[in-house]
Amino acid sequence: MTGRITPAQGRYAGKDAADRRAERRERFREAGLDLFGAGPGYRATRVGDLCKAAGLSTRQFYEEYRTLEDLLADLHLYVNEVAEKAVVTMLPQVRELPLAERISAYTHAYVRGAADDMRHARIAYVEIIGVSPRLNHQRLQRRAVWINLLDQITDDAIEQGELAPDDYRITAAALIGAINGLMHDWVVGWVAATRKEVAQELLRIILGRYRLTP
């Protein structure tokens, strides 16, 4: 005799359990982007607020995340991946250009990927800061990814004879720190500028260190 399939195992409205769970998780992420990145912010949001915005129950939330901090951590990784993809996608497209033009393309791609959606920028540069040791560690891990990417770009330029040999690892750390600082101040409104102006200022800083002209 065929066993009975429970709702959790079977299909409902044409979707299996995995599809339904992925859809719920996406709705919680979108609600988190709205509340953490455009609304009251992570610290002022409660689980009930998030569930109401997502149109889901608290029980469904706890099936996906243990705490709101887990959701913030998830979103922080997601917005970083969006920005990283914007830069990595640009790499092969500008490979044949002079170094200064490649760096210009990377810088604009980064700012576009990080701040085309200002909810992403607020989560990446503001909401994540000082939440917990765990998230501070995650933030530093993601910062290391960006440092390594910039390091690889300069190593390739040295190999091609476009940059003089030097210890650019410390440069990469300094530049990523400057980028994070400016982006934070811009997102919170301490710097009045357009996204393009922010990208141009970052580009001037980067090109100046590498002694390149646009």
Image: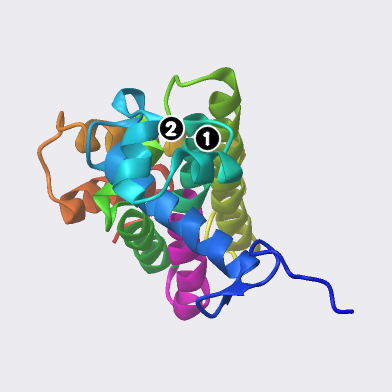
Identify the residue position indicated by label 1 in the image: 173
For this view, does 55 lie left or right of residue 118?
Answer: right
- The image's mark for residue 59 is none
Q: In which quarter of the view is residue 8 placed?
A: bottom right
Q: Nearer the viewer, residue 114 or 67?
A: 67
In the image, which residues are magenta? 80-98
Give how far across and how far down residue 58 sits, in percent.
46, 38
Q: Does the magenta stretch include residue 90?
A: yes
For this view, does 53 lie left or right of residue 171?
Answer: left
Q: Which of 159 and 74 is in front in this view?
A: 74
Residue at the (27%, 55%) spot, across then down: 117
Residue at the (60%, 25%) spot, across then down: 134
The secondary element bearing badge 1 is classed as helix
Identify the residue position indicated by label 2 in the image: 177
Q: In this view, does 54 lie above or below 171?
A: below
Give how far across and how far down residue 9 sits, in percent.
71, 66
* Position of the C terminus by quadrant: bottom left
Cβ atoms at labels 1 and 2 below 8 Å apart: yes
The secondary element bearing badge 2 is classed as helix
Is residue 85 visible in the rendered image? The answer is yes
Q: In which quarter of the view is residue 36 placed?
A: top left
Q: In this view, does 179 lie above or below 10?
A: above
Q: Report the amino acid beneath label 1.
A: Ala
For this view, does 125 lie left or right of residue 170?
Answer: left
Q: In this view, does 31 lie above or below 19?
A: above
Give how far across and how far down residue 100 sits, in percent.
38, 63
